[in-house]
Image: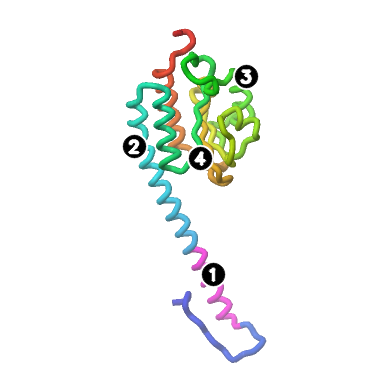
Amino acid sequence: LIKHLRLPHKEKGAVSLVELQVQRLRDKVLSLEQEITDLMSVAILNERIYHVYVDLLPDLMAGDSFAELQHRLSRALVDDLGVERVSLRLSQQFNLDELSPEYGLEKEQIERVRVTRLSQQPHYFGRMTKGELELLFDNTDDIASVALMPLGNNAELGFFVAASRDADHYVAGMDSLLLTQLCQVISSLLLRLVPLQSEA
């Protein structure tokens, strides 16, 4: 009722205390309504992301090659969630002879990205330099923010990277639970699908 109340008065040049209180309450109600709307939007998006991940994990487990792993990741995250690009960059401990050379990162490159962007953190969400992006993606056009996740302990297997054209899509402080679980699955699949150097 207060939200819709209008209390006219005949006093000119004076501020009605009641009217001022009502206006403040009205502003507070509008602010709370906007907050609820925003929370509902986030909840709907989170539910959508959750369902994509639930469908993706068994699909990844059924794959029998690195190419299929890449394809299924891209199909789910790019096509279904609107991520701009997805990239896997692997350490040289894998035998990458049968893969395109751009999938491999030298140990020094992995360590540089790990120290610069991860440090003691389990992931990095935010912006990266053009040089870093060129190391992680074939095409860096329209990339404004990234999610960088290590594969294995201290990124010894490489990195999983997702990119968005929206600078605010990946920002510090975002929840990473689903991405962390996804990367654990990817790490175990890599060890099954891509031979290590010692096995070559």
Reading the chain from its start, which is encountered first: label 2 or label 1?
1
Nearer mark to the viewer, of 3 and 4: 4
Question: Considering only vertical position in the picture, is 31 above or below 162?
Answer: below
Badge 2 is on which residue? 55
Reading the chain from its start, which is encountered first: label 4 or label 2?
2
Report the disc number at residue 108. 3
Q: Residue at x 44, y 28 (%)?
A: 70
Q: What secondary structure is marked by label 3?
A: helix
Badge 4 is on which residue? 84
Reading the chain from its start, which is encountered first: label 3 or label 2?
2
Reading the chain from its start, which is encountered first: label 3 or label 4?
4
Say which amino acid is labelled 3. Answer: Glu
Q: Are marks 3 and 2 in contact (CB under 8 Å)?
A: no
Say which amino acid is labelled 1. Answer: Asp
Question: Considering only vertical position in the picture, is 154 above or below 27?
Answer: above
Residue projecting furthest to the bottom:
10
